[in-house]
Amino acid sequence: MPPAGVALALGPVLLLLPLLPPTSAFFPNIWSLLAAPGSVTHQDLTEAAALNATLQLFLERPPPGRAPLRLEDFLGRTLLADDLFAAYFGPGAPARRFRAALGEVSRANAAQDFLPPARGDPDWHFDAERLGPGRARLAGALREALAAAQAGEQALARQRLGAALHALQDFYSHSNWVELGQRRPHPHLLRPRQELGGLAREGDPTCADCAELSCPGNLLGSAGLTSGYFGAYPAKPPGKCSHGGRFDQSSAQPPRGGINKDSTAPSFSPHHALHLQAAQLALQASIQAFGLLRSRLGDWGFSRLLAITPASSLSFVLDTTGSMGEELHAAKSQARHIAEQRRGGPAEPAHYVLVPFHDPGFGPVFSTSDPDSFWQLLSEIQAVGGGDEPEMSLSALELALLHTSPLSDIFVFTDASPKDAFLTHRVEALAQERRCRVTFLVTADPSQARRRRQALSPLRFEPYEGVALASGGEVIFTTDQHIRDVAAVVGDSVADLVVLPLGPPGPEPGPLVFTVDGLLRGVTVRIHGAVRSFRIRSPAGLSQGQEEGQGPLGLTRRFGQFWVVSVSDPPQTGTWEIQVAAEGSPRVRVQARTELDFLFHFGIPLEDGPHPGLYPLTQPVAGLRTQLLVEVTGLPSSRRAGPPPLFSHVVLRGAPEGAELGRVRLEPRGAPERGLLVASLPPPLLSAAGPFSLELLGRDGGGRELHRAAAQPCLVVPVLLELSGPGGSLAPGSKAPLILRIASFSGPRDLDLRTWVNSSFTLTSNLSRVRLEHNQSAWGRLWLEVPQSAAPRSVVVVTVAAMGREAGPVPPTHAFLRLLVLAPDPQRSRVLP
């Protein structure tokens, strides 16, 4: 965050909110790994602007049933998302999804410096005196963000918002607006129907020669509004300014030097002394951009864009064949229960998605934010026809994933195996990319089949197991008799619960163990499968078995072969044991409520290019030097007495068996209140095949052990797969080029490439097979044809998969690209009046 004392604009009031100092350059979305301490980054600007916009929303819209927020309560304080949510929604309200949404915007912002075609395009960075075209790109990206948000495509809207904010912030660092003595944001930059005015003319010199790192006086006094040239394209005309810095080739050509204010380091920024002034104006302009979007989206739409609510979306995928009558009743009851229980409160789902399927059809997608409309849609669905298996369940689940917000729950109700099991890997990758948890409620005995057209394998439900493992969900087999009760128990998981890591106490077989700390409440143990008996033992030695009713540890309920033990609050801290006797592998899951959780992603340090930094990854790539980036959520306010909890190590465990693969120290970055941590993952830890889970280890303020596990496992992918689009929206009837890069850093590979796109769109590629040597890349070109009939504000999803030609356990690597279809703008890039 910007250093203390940086003025933040909030509506008509000018505040001095002392936010956190900037994070270390190793944290995600930081411009440069080598930036000087005290520099303000794109991430800092984006998050500070979003927090100010959110505070303004909270001040103007008092929370129902709670006292209004007061502006004076936030003056002189560090502004944190967790504190802001606690003040508005009440203590314990999780800001995890809000912080995840800001991360999406920040990573999209950073990607403008890394991905083609944006990284070398001066229009996206206000370079090379391309101020008019730069404003057009900025306005277009904001228009696309607005259209995507209005269409309910929040993830795409955040991507386009990140691109817009990058350009907007670059204007104040790359142009001479600050040097011209301006102390307010440009009044017409976000109003493209107004002329920019005062631009330097073509052929007029703007800079004098400067042979030093620091060039405070190199701008010519007669220069109008200008910006520096970067690199070799476009070539710098005589007399014009360079961007400057050690990575700018043009700065060696007369006039030497440059004018950028990207950092406080002279080696990167010849106008480093004006860095904080440029950051101040960029921050105020970013707040204005958030305000403009809010004015067009309304408060509810703006809240959805930034996930300014503790609740997630909720999606149901329903088998509608004739044998599913009882399951449909259970799904309807559970949907109504969730909607009514959480209506009007902070946990009310922000969006509802419903996708039916049968054989051979699936869909359409029903999507709404109104719980009554959702209930009406659900109540109209009837179970008809069919009666045999398999069904098109994974196709329907893929549709649900494409229309469900990240970090949400998806429930699949079925009594059939998948007919489209070939989609398994693609659905697994999509669930991990969206970070959605998928739970299958299957009213079938895996060893039996419904009326058969053909012999069915007893392993036919394995695709569900794979998707559940990849997404952090479950497969629960039950019966028609118990489906309603089981669904009610599982439905309670849509709240923000953490899954406690389970593991054996040592190398020898024995009971499962889990650790309870003093920050956990509502501990629940779920056990299902062919269970003969089980026993749970507390750290004090008290135990409770499978007998129903209240026991010494809590309440036990049973629904067929599904047991739920709700541990009495407060649970005893320490190590608990679960001993289960069963046929086969029983399924055990321990969940709890807590404010303390974490977000994570991966990054590759890049030390060349226009702005060295940390390139974000969805999954780690074999052979690449990889950083793990952790953001702890739910830390207690800095105003509370006593030391805060601290995480010191991350443990990588094989999934699902839980064997420890290794552990690495976590290093804090920035102010402790932010909870930003980084770990450098050694290559040997990323060489094992198969999924792995992340577990954070630390201690609470009293020195007692803390354990938190990631909701989803991770997977080391064998190759880096990048898919980038034209950097803007698509017009109906157009043909857009896409760029594909595939690289191997872990040895030679022979790969087949496959592509998918929405029906009615056409996708062609010039690359279908490739052989890569170690540290070699290949580039491909795809062409996406948009039909003339494509609906405005519709979204097309392009998927590319790279798979090895040799048979093996490594799943394909997937890349997903979402693009927005918009009708041509008759007033060219008009965004807002």
Image (tube, rainbow, N blue to C red):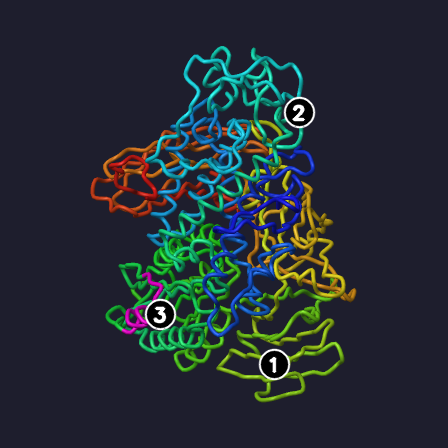
Question: Which is nearer the N-term, disc 3 or disc 1?
Answer: 3
Circle 1: is it few (<14), some (14-19), or many (20+) Cα within 10 Å? few
Q: Earlier in the sequence, mark 2 or mark 1?
A: 2
Based on the displayed image, in which of its 4 quarters is residue 7 positioned? top right
Identity, as a three-letter code, of the amino acid under mark 2: Ser
Say above or below: 359 vs 532. above
C-alpha distance separating marks 2 and 1: 68 Å
Element under label 3?
helix
Provide the residue span drawn in magenta: 367-379
Q: Amino acid at mark 1?
A: Ser
Screen quadrant of the C terminus: top left
Of the image marks 3 and 2, the number of the one nearer the N terminus = 2
375 part of magenta stretch:
yes
- Location of mark 2 (residue): 267
Residue type (three-letter) at the residue carrying disc 3: Pro
184 relative to 408, above or below: above
Q: Nearer the viewer, mark 2 or mark 1?
A: 2
> Seen in the image, is 75 located left or right of residue 102?
right
Q: Which residue is mark 1?
A: 533
- Give the labeled residue for mark 3: 371
